[in-house]
Amino acid sequence: MTKRIRGLTAIAVTVLLGAAASACSEEAPKDLERARRVQAALDSANAALDQERDAELKLIRTCMNDKGFKVFPAGGSGTDSGKKQSGDLSPSPETARTVGYGADPRTSDTRKPQGGPDDFDALPEDVKRAHSMAMDGYVDKPEGGVEFDFGGGKVMVPSTGCRGETLKAVYGDVKEYLRLTWTVYNKVKQNGARILADDDGYQKALSEWASCMKSGGYPEIATPEKAREVALSRYANVPETAAAALDNARDAEIKQATTDAECAAGVDLNTEAREAKSKASAASLVKHEADIMAWLELVTKARGKAQDLLREAS
């Protein structure tokens, strides 16, 4: 059941994390400026996708609640909102001052989902099957979904149920969504962690950023990933009803994020990261420029649509 619940957003995330870095060909330097622009577009698309996914999952949860389902498998809600999967490594100063990293559970889905895995597993089998039908429009065998054949297999998402209905409402052309998702995250093939680990310019900026964070009062934070982990940990074990404690955690998060943003701006950390990825994947970025730009446009529109629908629903 859990795999079906995660299926909607797993396509982009899974292939992005599993892909290997593309080699930079001898011709790539000629196209580096172009690659930089495309890399910026890809980063923007990834950031927009994170925001769209958060709204999308909330829409699906609302749809399922309307159908009477209040308990979900552990993978049935967005629990990674405060973890950075893509885009800039450090927040912009404006974002840092307003929402920090977006870890506040009152404005995101960072807290545990309604019901835990034990709660869902304890449900009668007929209720679980009804849940699957309401979510995806099928129980045991995927059928009647929207498919994209990429030549070596197919990817599919439901066309009915809360998941399928939400996808169609948000993206419109679901098959094009599948095509661009597959193309961008399987053919551009960026492995950001490996690229950044191998780039001297980025590593120098990272060292300077960590020194700045230490001077700013955060000696335990040596990487942007650790910064987000620390931000999330501030909300751990804080009851949802403890408004004052949550306010304190949010204030601490914003203070940390602001220091992070200022340090990153001072050493051009995000710029160095984009430059490293642009250089390493220049040939692939340029080759797939049209699809990346189309992906950015599609995801940006979908984000707006999802957020509009979420406002209407609430």
Image (tube, rainbow, N blue to C red):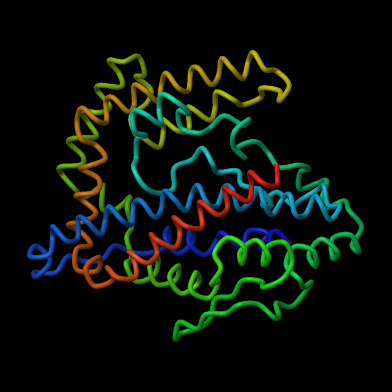
Q: Look at 56% across and 68% down and name the residue there.
A: 172
Give coordinates of residue 314: x percent, y percent: 70, 41
Task: Report the side of 269 relative to 119 (left or right).
Answer: left
The quarter of the rendered structure image containing the N terminus is: bottom right
The foreground one among 266 and 232 is: 266
Q: Look at 48% across and 49% down and name the residue there.
A: 50
Q: Quadrant of residue 183?
A: bottom left
Give coordinates of residue 237: x percent, y percent: 66, 24
Q: Look at 44% across and 63% down and name the residue there.
A: 298
Q: Is residue 91 above or below residue 1?
A: above
The foreground one among 142 and 50 is: 50
Task: Report the side of 40 relative to 135 (left or right).
Answer: left
Q: Quadrant of residue 64?
A: bottom right
The foreground one among 30 and 198 is: 30
Task: Report the side of 233 relative to 273 (left or right).
Answer: right
Q: Look at 25% across and 45% down and name the residue there.
A: 273
Question: How many circles with numbers are drawn on the protein?
Answer: 0
Q: Is residue 97 above or below residue 138?
A: above
Q: Is residue 245 above or below residue 171?
A: above
Give coordinates of residue 101: x percent, y percent: 46, 32
Task: Report the side of 124 relative to 189 (left or right).
Answer: right
Give coordinates of residue 158: x percent, y percent: 66, 71
